[in-house]
Amino acid sequence: MTDLPTAFADFGPARLSAAVIAAYLVAGEPVVGYVLHRRFEGWLRTDPAARRSFYRRLLVLEWGLALVGLVVWVAASDVGAAQVGLVPPQRWPGVLSWLAVAALLLLVLASTRTLRSGALAGPPPEVLRRTRPGEARHAEPPGHATLALLPRSRSERHLFALVGVTAGVCEEWLYRGFFLAVVAALVPGLPTAGLVLVAGLGFGLAHAYQGLSGVLTTGVLGGVLAGLYLATGSLLLPVLLHAAIDLRFLLVPSSALPRAVA
């Protein structure tokens, strides 16, 4: 297990900022993500550049929040790089970690194959429910909201590749390295299983815009990545795995995606 902080006092003068960021990741990010995604779905109907604009917003938001977290960590002089996973792997994962990663990869491969087959390309209902002026929400099946995010054109694919790498780097730093350091400091002695559960819950809630199935799926992903981080003492493998999982969508041709959200 990584050498997590054992007391909140380790964050020194950065304690309040660290607690605020951790609280935002759990309670604020789900709301912000949900609102932004619903607006994005409305923009898709009228703006052909909506995806590229949304990708740019995501890049600014994720790198911005990651930078804020980095500044807060630097201000916490008693929290070292090893305590937030910013070191090379310190040990090999155990058998349980390898099995969890293998199971996750099998599920990812199966879902990618389903997408590539075009099984989800049939048009979903065209009905839109207006919420506020200028906003709209697709009446999509639960769990399919994320399909609107997938790139169709070459220019969208280029930006999406940056988004995938950004998600791997920034989200692992925020939800595994930084967040778990704050949780461990606030709740000293929390066992590894508890840390994995908290990390999975926080990451799942951040994807509330995907519906209940999306929360559960990303929650499992967050838990597995947290377990891998704690097992190796480093964010390196979780970052690589996370980025690869997101970048797999580049293997899905636009013809296999629903036309109604294009």
Image: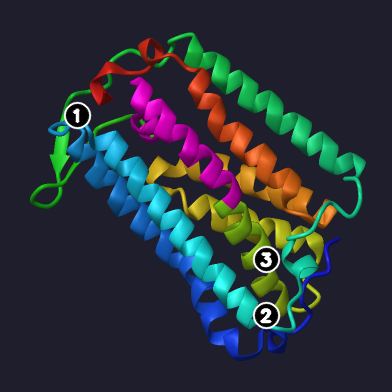
Secondary structure state at the residue bearing disc 3: helix
Name the main secondary structure of what is drawn in magenta: helix
In the image, residue 73 lies at what x, y percent?
63, 74
* Label 2 vs 3, first from the N-terminus: 3
Q: Which residue is mark 3?
A: 180
- Let me know if residue 167 is in the magenta part: yes
In the image, residue 151 lies at what x, y percent?
38, 26
* Label 2 vs 1, first from the N-terminus: 1
Mark pair 3, 1: CA separation: 39 Å
**154 is higher (above) or lower (below) than 78:** above
| Residue 241 visible in rendering | yes
Secondary structure state at the residue bearing disc 2: helix
- The kind of residue tagged 2 is Leu
Q: Please name whichever residue, 99 or 45, is drawn nearer the observer in this view of the structure.
A: 45
Q: Residue at x 49, y 54 (%)?
A: 205
- In the image, the segment drawn in magenta is 143-169
Q: Residue at x 62, y 27 (%)?
A: 108
- The kind of residue tagged 3 is Leu
- Locate the N terminus by quadrant: bottom right
Image side of residue 83 versus residue 176, left or right: right
Q: Residues within 10 Å of mark 3 (few under 14, many from 20)?
A: many
Q: Please name whichever residue, 73 or 118, is drawn nearer the observer in this view of the structure.
A: 73
- Mark carried by residue 186: 2
| Residue reaching furthest to the left | 133
